[in-house]
Amino acid sequence: GAVVSQHPSRVICKSGTSVKIECRSLDFQATTMFWYRQFPKQSLMLMATSNEGSKATYEQGVEKDKFLINHASLTLSTLTVTSAHPEDSSFYICSASRLGMAQDTQYFGPGTRLTVL
Amino acid sequence: LAKTTQPISMDSYEGQEVNITCSHNNIATNDYITWYQQFPSQGPRFIIQGYKTKVTNEVASLFIPADRKSSTLSLPRVSLSDTAVYYCLVGPQNTGTASKLTFGTGTRLQVTL
């Protein structure tokens, strides 16, 4: 149990286009989902916290108009990278927290590799 | 969230026990210690979590001294497939809401024959 999926696993796009990444909790409900970004050889950096039915909370330095997050249901959160540029190329990872549980039950997705040409 | 300090990298031979120590001098009373494992191009995977003394599961053991200012992840008899980055995190649990996780640099473990 506690499986989190991401789609797509890999995407290549042209500069200026928008890309949507989906994060789904497959067998549990997640009130909170988190979005991270990871550059090569670096640690995960939290971008935003997504709560079902409310606006996402962005970390300092993360542009909310560029990284649009929607958490429309208890099993789905989406991250849209708008007007992507080569510097947005990165590995994007989501995690989902089980309803009613806390820190040790954050389950991570497999990640999405975004390459912007 | 308490800041953590880990060695950047470690090397081990297959079959050996590996101990990775994490320092968290500013750990708060209600903070727990959690370790994650990450393989290249994959999301992190939960390994073990503890509050004090010793915790053991089928994968690893976690040793936490009385002052809780550090913790040691112990991997018994590592294999090549244990080559990964290991992250130590500290933060509150059972607050009623999901807590943010702040990842440090992690420890890159390389296991060879």
Image (spheres, rainbow, N blue to C red):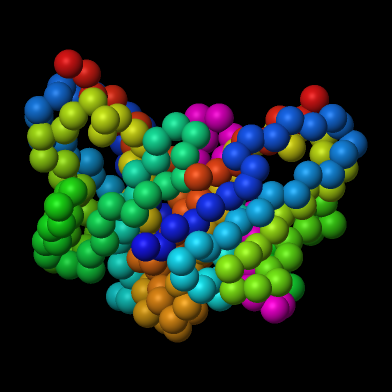
Q: Is residue A50 magenta?
A: yes
B77 up-or-down from A65: above or below: above
Residue A12 in view, yes or no: yes
User: Is A46 displayed left or right of B92 in the figure?
Assistant: right
Report how many numbered discs are placed on residues in the image: 0
A4 to B93, vertically: above or below: above
Picture coordinates of residue B11, whole percent (x, y): 24, 24
Taking the spot 47% from the left edge, 78% from the top edge, the residue there is A99
Residue B98 showing in the rendered view: no
Is B43 colored magenta in this rendering?
no
| Residue visible at 41% across and 73% down in the picture | A102
Residue at the spot x=46%, y=66% of the render? A27
Foreground pick, A89 / B42: B42
- In magenta, the rendered stretch is A38-54
The picture quadrant where one finds residue B74 is: top left
- Residue A52 sits in which quadrant? bottom right
x and y, in percent, of residue A31 in the image:
56, 75
Q: On the rendered image, what quadrant is the C terminus of chain A found in?
A: top right
Residue in view at x 30 percent, y 75 percent: B29
Quick check: A14 above or below B104?
above
Image quarter in which the N terminus of chain A is found:
bottom left
Percent of width and height locating residue B47: 28, 52
Left or right of residue B29, residue B14 in this image? left
Q: Position of residue B19 (x, y in %)?
A: 17, 40
Left or right of B17 on screen, residue B37: right
Q: Is residue B63 above or below residue B1?
A: above
